[in-house]
Image (tube, coloured by chain):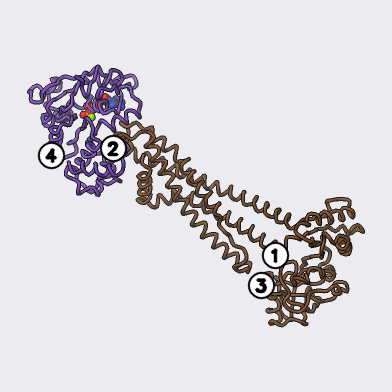
Chain colours: A brown, B purple
Amino acid sequence: MNFGQSFRLAVKSLMTSKMRSLLTMLGIIIGVAAVIIITSLGNGMQNYMNDQFEEMGSNLVQAQVYLTGSSLDVKADDMYALVEKYPQYLSGVTPYNSIQGTVRQGSDEFKRTSVYGVGETFYNVNKNTIMTGSSLGKGRFLSYVDVEREMAVCVIGSYLEQEAFGGDALGKTLTVSGAPFTVVGVLDQSGDSSEGSSDDCIYIPYTQANRLGGSQWYVLYMFTSTDRSTAAAAKGIVENRLFKAYHDTDYYVVLTSAEMMDAMDSMVNLLMAILTLIAAISLLVGGIGIMNIMLVSVTERTREIGIRKSLGAKGRDIRSQFIIEAGTTSAIGGGIGIVLGIIMANAITNVIALVLGTGNDGFVAMPTLQGIAVAFGVSVAIGILFGYLPANKAAKLNPIDALRYD
Amino acid sequence: MEHLIEFKDIYKIYQMGEETVHALDGVDLTIDQGEFVAIVGQSGSGKSTAMNIIGCLDVPTSGTYHLGGIDVSTMEDDQQAEIRNKMLGFIFQQYNLIPKLNVQENVELPLLYAGVSAEERHERAIRSLERVGLADKRKNLPSQLSGGQQQRVSIARALAGNPSVILADEPTGALDSRTGREVLSFLQKLNAEGDTVVLITHDNSIAVKAKRIVRLQDGRIIYDGDSQDPQAVVQPEETGAADEDDGFAALLVEEVGE
Ligand SMILES: Nc1ncnc2c1ncn2[C@@H]1O[C@H](COP(=O)(O)OP(=O)(O)OP(=O)(O)O)[C@@H](O)[C@H]1O
Ligand SMILES: [Mg+2]
C-alpha cells in the first residue's frame, strides 16, 4: 500500500506516546551512538598517527635492537659505519633513547618532561629540523663533539624554556636525574607549548643518556633513507648487518615508517572491529526491543487490522504497514543515535585535547561518512528484520476474529 | 437473470470439541440488485455468520456463494480482500473507525487499498462525506464526533468505494432511537438511489423499514418475504416472544422467578 501514509502513521503513533517510543528506540540509539563514537575515535586515532608519521618523515627506518650484554652487541659506531658504507641508501642514523629522569631547574621540578638521548644526526642541518619535525629556534643542536666527548649539554623545547627560564634559556643550566646540563639550543614551538606536550622535552647526547638511563634492555636507532623509495632497501641493509652480528632474527626488529604506520593502523583497525562488534550487540538488543513493542502494538491494534482487512487490505498491505512502522522507528532511533554519537565524539575530542594538552591540532575524533551511513543502514535493516515477525503476525490475522477483538 | 447474491445450500459448521454447531444449516438465498433486505432472527440464529459469508470475511463449510456472478465461496484470503474492496461496503454496530485517522483519512481507506491516486481519493472522500452531510468535519478525529456522526462517517466510508452491496450489521445497535432512525432513513435513501442494502438486526421495528425480511432460526430460513406481510414479524413459536429482546427479558424473568 501507500508508503507515505504508512510513514506518516508511524511517525504519528511514535509522537503520541513519546516515552514509550523513546524506550523502544533506546537500544538502537545507544547502539548507533556507540558505533559512531567508536568509528570516530578510530578514525581520529589513525589521522593522528598519520600526522605524527608525516611529521617524522616517510623515509625513516627504525631499528630496535635488544641488548644481550655480550660482545655480540652492535654499537652505535657500527651503525654509523653502515651509513658511510651505503650512502646511496642511507643518509643518516642516530640512537634515539627515551630515558626516565627527573628534570629540575632551581627549585622547580618538571615531572612530565620527556628526555631523549640522540646523536648529532638527529638534526638535519639543511632543513634546520630534527627528526620529529620540530625546527631549531635558538642556538645550535647537539654536535659530533658533544656526543663524542659526552658533553653535558642539551637542547630543550619551547615550553621548558618558558617555564624554567622565563624565555631566555641559552647558556643556563638544568639537571636531569641530578646531573647538570647546559642549554645550547631551543626548539621552536610545535605543539601548544603546554605541560607534557611535544614542546616539553629535552634532547641530550646519547652517550650521556646511556649513563643516566642505567641498564636498558634495548636501544633504538633511527636511520634515514636517502628517499622514500629507498626505505625498503635501507631496511634490508640494516637487517643484514644485524643478522651478521646476532645470527638470529629474534634480537632485533627493523621497521620502515610505512610499516610502522601499517602495523599501527591494523592494530587500531582490529581494536575498532572488536569494539564495533560489541556495539553491534547493543543494536541487536535494540532490534529485539523493537520486535517486542511491535508485537504489543499488533495485539493492541488487532481491531484496526480487522477494520483495514474488511475494507480490502491484503496481507501484504498490513505487513508492509507494520514493517514500515518498525523501520521508521529504528530509523528515527538511528538518526538520534547519530546525532548523539557526533556530539559525544566532539566531547571526547575536547576532553582528550584538555588531558593531553595537544590543543586543536592534536587528536580529533572525526565521525566518518561511512560510519554514519553504515550505522544508519544497519539500524533501519534491524528495524525491518525484527519488524517482520510482528508484521507477519498482523498480516495473518483472521479479519472476523480481529474485528471482534477488543 | 443473474442474481447479485446467490447462496446455494450454504452450511457453516463449527466444531466445538465434541459438539458441532450448525451456524448456517443449508441456506438458499438470492438477493437482487437494488433490494433492501433485513436479515433478522434471535441471538445465535446465524445472522452474523450469514453476514460474514455475504461480506467475504468468511467462507462456508459447504455450498456455493456467487457474488455478482463470481464464485467467492472458495477464494483465498487476498482474493476475498479484493472482492471486499471492490464490491462491498460495511457498516458496523461499533462504527469501527480508526481512532488515529481523521474523518477524511478513514473514508479514504477503501480507496487507498484500491490503489486510487491521492488526488482522486481526496475528491471521492469529500463527495462521499457530502452525501452524509459531514464534509465540514473531515479534519476531525472520530472521537470528536457523536455516535450518530461517527456512524454516518462509517456510511460515507462504505460508500466511498462505490460498492455493489452495502452490508450493515446492527447499525443502530449503539445509537439512541432518534439517531438510529436517522441512520435508518439514510439507508432507505441510499436504497432509493439504487444501492443494494443488506441490513442485519434483531429488532423487528427496524426490520420493517426494509422492503424484504429474511428470518433465520437455528441457521435456517424460516421466513423470506415482504416486510409488510404480517407473517414477517411473527415470532417463532418456541420462544413465544415478539423479538429477541423480549425473549431475553422473558428468560431473565424466568430465572428470577426460580
Ligand atoms: N467462531 C465460532 N466458533 C464456534 N461457534 C461459533 C462461532 N461463531 C459463531 N458460532 C456459533 O454459531 C451460531 C450463530 O452465531 P452468530 O454469531 O451468527 O449469531 P447471531 O445471529 O449473529 O447472534 P447475535 O444476534 O447475538 O449477534 C451461534 O450458536 C454461535 O455460538
Ligand atoms: Mg451477530
Comes first in the chain, label 4 or label 2: 2
Q: Which residue does the numbered mark 2 point to in the structure image?
A: B110
**Element on which disc 1 rests:** helix
Binning the other alpha carbons within 10 Å of mark 1 as few (below 14), some (14 to 19) or many (20 upward) gives few
**Element on which disc 4 rests:** helix
In the rendered image, residue A284, in percent from the top left (x then y), is placed at: 52, 44
Identify which amino acid the numbered label 3 is placed on.
Answer: Glu
Instruction: Tell me if residue A64 can be seen.
Output: yes
Of circles 4 and 2, the one toward us is 2
- Comparing A361 with A319, the one in front is A361
Q: CA distance from mark 2 to mark 1?
A: 69 Å
In the rendered image, residue B227, in percent from the top left (x then y), is placed at: 10, 25
Instruction: Tell me if residue B258 can be seen.
Output: no
In the rendered image, residue A300, in percent from the top left (x then y), is placed at: 35, 41
**Residue A148 picture quarter:** bottom right
Binning the other alpha carbons within 10 Å of mark 4 as few (below 14), some (14 to 19) or many (20 upward) gives some
Q: Are marks 2 and 3 on the same chain?
A: no
- Comparing A198 with B66, the one in front is B66
Of circles 4 and 1, the one toward us is 1
Identify which amino acid the numbered label 4 is placed on.
Answer: Glu
Q: CA distance from mark 1 to mark 3?
A: 20 Å
Q: Which residue does the numbered mark 1 point to in the structure image?
A: A55
Give the numbered dot on residue B182.
4
Identify which amino acid the numbered label 2 is placed on.
Answer: Pro
